[in-house]
């Protein structure tokens, strides 16, 4: 099923691209006036159940098991246990074992709560009057796997480090153990990979009522142009600011620890700097559509996304769900290769290129933009055979 209305741009007689499966982005045109609520995809209930099991039920179950095990081990633990280790596996922080009973399950609950990020996005999408049916994308499969990965890592870390201290007189007697810091993460990653492949591979896009633009009828001396912009919405802006503040606070906290590894500090600093730069670059894009094709340029001049007019195969207008399709907002790349500038849930433009990745952008007045790009693409495709014919005639002469 599809969530958009294609504008066919190929000249008559041109070889068609291979037909895509029913789950592909570009499907047969359905006029907006005849839009009907479609039935749910038969695999969607199974996908939702699998996602809940992987991203919610199993992490919550691990929290319950962790609390039971910690309570059973509590009489065998010293008055103070190790709760922090250096990069070399040397215990350098100690506290009451009660902290372990609270800390690790609390972090596990926090990991499980991330599952509801996709549910919030689904609720927002359902409030849109222009969409029909459910939306399901790669991120609905990926996020539960990430939650499971983190939950299993935290569970393994808590159980393993606590088990090492059973029957010790004092947590400071714990011998250095690098494995305590290494083992949990491969275990968590393996669990996340299994959780990902345990879910069905499914993509369901929302059908929407959207009037597609059509190529404009213009004279030979006329030109087509469309100017617009893609800017952040207030919810996205505040989310971005909150994430950056939390990231900065975490980086400052790591800097304040005397035992912090220089490599860890450098990696966290580089990661935070990269996120900050990309966030600023993606605040606003200026869009221009003319006879050359589509161009979206960051307000600082870079990055730039282009689709040449003669490389455009199809243009469509439809509902875009940033979280379900791209895993978030801003400048994004999906696992299937699509590139998106997505700032909100709602109307947007989808551009299928003959060569290169497909482009997805959220735009106001996307139908006019689609009409302008369809016109430019049609003119470019009409001009190409004429140029080729002229070249051949010149060569024969």
Image (tube, rainbow, N blue to C red):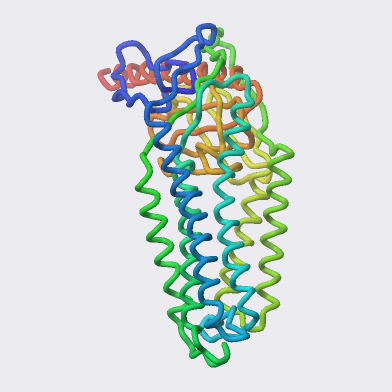
State left or right for residue 353 relative to residue 108: left
Image position of 262 with respect to 397: above or below: below
Q: Report the front residue among 394 and 99.
A: 99
Task: State the residue lying farthest toward the left.
Answer: 396
Residue 338 figure quarter? top left
Image position of 296 with respect to 33: above or below: below
Q: Report the front residue among 133 and 211.
A: 133
Where residue 275 appears, x then y in whole percent? 61, 56
**Image quarter (top left, top right, bottom left or bottom right) of the N terminus:** top left
State left or right for residue 265 relative to residue 183: right
Residue 67 figure quarter? bottom right
Q: Report the front residue among 147 and 161.
A: 161
Q: Report the front residue among 236 and 277.
A: 236
The number of callouts visible is 0
Q: Residue at x 36, y 40 (%)?
A: 200
**Image quarter (top left, top right, bottom left or bottom right) of the C terminus:** top left
Q: Residue at x 66, y 83 (%)?
A: 258
Q: Residue at x 63, y 34 (%)?
A: 344
Q: Residue at x 38, y 55 (%)?
A: 193
Where residue 316 appears, x then y in whole percent? 50, 21
State left or right for residue 394 relative to residue 219: left
Residue 16 figure quarter? top left
Where residue 227 appears, x then y in whole percent? 66, 26
């Amino acid at each position: 099923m599809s969530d958009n209305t294609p504008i066919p741009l190929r000249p008559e007689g041109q070889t068609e691209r291979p037909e895509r499966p029913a789950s592909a982005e570009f499907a047969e045109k359905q006029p907006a006036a005849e839009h009907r609520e479609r039935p749910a995809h038969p695999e969607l209930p199974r996908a939702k159940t699998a996602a809940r099991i992987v991203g919610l039920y199993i992490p919550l179950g691990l929290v319950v098991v962790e609390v039971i095990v910690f309570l059973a081990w509590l009489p065998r633990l010293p008055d103070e246990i190790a709760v922090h280790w250096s990069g070399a596996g040397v215990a350098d922080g100690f506290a009451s074992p009660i902290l372990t009973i609270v800390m690790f399950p609390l972090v596990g609950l926090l990991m499980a709560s991330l599952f509801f990020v996709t549910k919030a996005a689904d609720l927002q999408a359902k409030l849109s009057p222009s969409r029909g049916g459910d939306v399901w994308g790669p991120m609905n499969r990926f996020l539960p796997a990430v939650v499971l990965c983190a939950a299993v890592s935290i569970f393994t870390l808590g159980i393993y480090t606590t088990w090492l201290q059973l029957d010790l007189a004092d947590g400071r007697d714990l011998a250095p153990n690098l494995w305590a810091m290494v083992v949990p993460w491969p275990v968590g990653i393996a669990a996340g990979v299994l959780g990902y492949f345990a879910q069905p591979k499914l993509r369901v896009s929302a059908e929407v009522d959207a009037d597609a633009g059509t190529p404009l009828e213009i004279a030979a001396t006329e030109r087509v142009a469309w100017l617009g912009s893609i800017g952040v919405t207030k919810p996205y802006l505040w989310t971005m600011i909150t994430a950056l503040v939390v990231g900065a606070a975490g980086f400052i906290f790591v800097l304040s620890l005397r035992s912090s590894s220089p490599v860890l500090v450098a990696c966290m600093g580089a990661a935070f700097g990269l996120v900050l730069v990309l966030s600023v670059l993606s605040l606003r894009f200026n869009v221009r559509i003319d006879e050359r094709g589509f161009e979206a340029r960051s307000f600082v001049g870079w990055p730039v996304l282009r689709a040449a007019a003669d490389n455009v195969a199809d243009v469509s207008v439809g509902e875009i769900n940033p979280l379900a399709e791209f895993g978030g907002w801003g400048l994004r790349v999906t696992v299937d290769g699509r590139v998106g500038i997505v700032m909100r849930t709602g109307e947007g433009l989808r551009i299928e290129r003959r060569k290169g990745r497909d482009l997805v952008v959220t735009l106001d007045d996307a139908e006019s933009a689609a009409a302008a790009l369809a016109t430019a693409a049609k003119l470019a495709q009409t001009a190409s055979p004429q140029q080729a014919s002229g070249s051949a005639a010149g060569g024969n002469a």
